[in-house]
Image (spheres, rainbow, N blue to C red):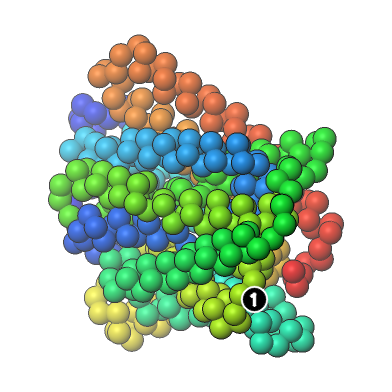
């Protein structure tokens, strides 16, 4: 594998400061496009889908929610395609998002991109632990609604299970059969949630689909929901996922992306629209809290949501694991005492901090909004369009350049507005609920 920094006389280089790019300690170029497609699909059909009826549809309503989800699908496919096509820009593979940004812009952009990506993945991982804890608590209350097992305790249990999984699975390609389990888990809670929502909707009286709130609150919640739209589809780590794919990497990642944004989005649409149709503006931020049905069926849905969250978190934590493993030269057998001890301490410590933040501020919808605003918008839309503009500037027409600049300016404004809205939502919720709240 070539160095991501390139050579100083490379004609594709735009700047004069070379970025030192380390070789990776993780496995690359080994996975089929279909396995990568399942990784991407696992990301968008994670247990987060159980929240979109409440966090996207309720603030936006039928028209805004449906149009927004379809537009976000098309825009996300386009933006991810731009990043995927730059994977071998300059004749070298850029296996990390920050490597690509550093190659095109220089050292400062390398550091800024890594900081943005770290924040993005940390927030996503925190949300997964909140999700897993919420699912565990929901399953417990089906059998014993005595208030003994509170949400912070469930989040702590979820964090421990996530840490054990992270210790056992050394890198992204090693997920292997776990992606199959993840798909089964996803389809289980999506089908159960969909079926029970349809049953409840048929049996319920007419629902209120009016957008709740008014004045400034309504505006801020609408803006926050727009950040959730982009959060629903984007990983902020496409180059890291693309690094695992076999050659030809650009052709194969496009196959994976087309799968993700066609077949892969169908379950997300099903559960999101069915949940909102069944419960209207009273839809909860965790849909399984709304559904009615046999206890064992609801328990199965919650347990599979818990287990899938553990697997999905590992995908989004993998760039941090790769960085740490590469920095400390952790290679070879996963069962090597040195490697095992390292993962127990370092990955365990990283997830312990994630778990602490999740238990401290367990506001799932707010985390989704803030993550979309401060990192998913810049990484997936602003940076993707600008990198493509800089890399291909001599090959683009004036109309194409104008198109990319319109995207850049629009998403910059959207990112700032969504950040303000998300911080306001967290501030409001923090006043309503105390820290380590049992919600």
Q: Secondary structure at mark 1?
A: helix
Q: Nearer the viewer, residue 50 or 432?
A: 50
Q: Nearer the viewer, residue 394 or 22?
A: 394
Image location (x, y in percent) of residue 249: 20, 47
Q: Is residue 154 left or right of residue 308?
A: right
Residue 40, image quadrant: bottom left
Q: How many marks?
A: 1
* Residue at the top extreme of this rendering: 398
Image location (x, y in percent) of residue 142: 66, 82
The residue depicted at 78 percent of the width and 51 percent of the height is: 427
Image location (x, y in percent) of residue 270: 48, 54
* Residue at the left extreme of this rendering: 247
The residue depicted at 41 percent of the width and 52 percent of the height is: 266
Residue 433, image quadrant: bottom right
Q: Nearer the viewer, residue 89 or 382?
A: 382
Quadrant, the C terminus: bottom right
Residue 19, image quadrant: top left
Q: Is residue 91 above or below residue 324?
A: above
Q: Is residue 336 left or right of residue 361?
A: left
Residue underneath mark 1: 138
Q: Is residue 78 left or right of residue 244?
A: right
Image location (x, y in percent) of residue 240: 33, 53
Q: Residues within 10 Å of mark 1 (few under 14, many from 20)?
A: many
> Would residue 287 be visible to someone looking at this image?
no
Q: Is residue 78 above or below residue 367?
A: above
The residue depicted at 47 percent of the width and 66 percent of the height is: 191
> Would residue 337 be visible to someone looking at this image?
yes
The residue depicted at 56 percent of the width and 61 percent of the height is: 198
Q: Is residue 145 above or below residue 398?
A: below
């Amino acid at each position: 594998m070539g160095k991501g920094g390139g050579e100083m006389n490379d004609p594709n280089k735009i700047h004069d400061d070379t970025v030192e790019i380390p070789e990776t300690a993780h496995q690359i170029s080994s996975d089929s496009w279909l396995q990568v497609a399942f990784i991407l699909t696992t990301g968008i059909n994670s247990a987060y889908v159980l929240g979109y009826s409440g966090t996207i549809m309720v603030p936006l309503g039928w028209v805004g929610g449906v149009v927004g989800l379809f537009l976000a699908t098309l825009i996300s496919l386009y933006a991810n395609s731009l990043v995927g096509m730059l994977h071998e820009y300059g004749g070298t593979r850029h296996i990390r998002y920050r490597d690509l940004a550093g190659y095109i812009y220089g050292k400062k952009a390398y550091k800024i991109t890594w900081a943005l990506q770290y924040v993005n993945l940390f927030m996503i991982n925190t949300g997964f632990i909140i999700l897993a804890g919420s699912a565990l608590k929901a399953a417990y209350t089906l059998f014993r609604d005595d208030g003994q097992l509170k949400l912070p305790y469930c989040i702590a249990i979820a964090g421990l299970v996530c840490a054990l999984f992270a210790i056992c699975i050394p890198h992204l390609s090693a997920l292997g059969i776990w992606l199959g389990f993840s798909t089964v888990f996803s389809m289980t809670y999506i089908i159960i949630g969909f079926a029970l929502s349809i049953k409840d909707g048929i049996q319920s009286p007419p629902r209120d689909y009016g957008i709740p709130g008014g004045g400034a609150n309504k505006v801020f919640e609408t803006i926050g929901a727009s950040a959730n739209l982009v959060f629903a589809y984007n990983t902020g780590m496409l180059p890291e996922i693309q690094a695992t794919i076999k050659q030809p990497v650009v052709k194969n990642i496009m196959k994976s992306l087309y799968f993700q944004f066609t077949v892969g989005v169908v379950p997300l649409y099903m559960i999101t629209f069915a949940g909102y149709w069944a419960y209207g503006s009273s839809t909860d931020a965790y849909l399984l809290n709304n559904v009615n049905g046999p206890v064992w069926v609801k328990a199965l849905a919650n347990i599979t949501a818990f287990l899938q969250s553990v697997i999905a978190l590992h995908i989004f934590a993998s760039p941090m694991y790769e960085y740490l493993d590469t920095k400390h030269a952790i290679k070879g057998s996963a069962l090597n005492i040195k490697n095992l001890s390292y993962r127990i301490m370092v990955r365990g410590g990283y997830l312990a901090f994630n778990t602490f933040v999740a238990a401290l501020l367990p506001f799932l919808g707010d985390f989704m909004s803030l993550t979309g605003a401060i990192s998913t918008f810049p990484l997936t839309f602003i940076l993707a369009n600008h990198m493509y503009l800089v890399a291909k500037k001599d090959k683009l027409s004036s109309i194409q350049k104008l198109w990319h600049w319109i995207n850049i300016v629009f998403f910059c404004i959207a990112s700032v507005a969504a950040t303000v809205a998300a911080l306001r939502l967290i501030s409001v919720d923090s006043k309503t609920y105390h820290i380590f709240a049992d919600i």
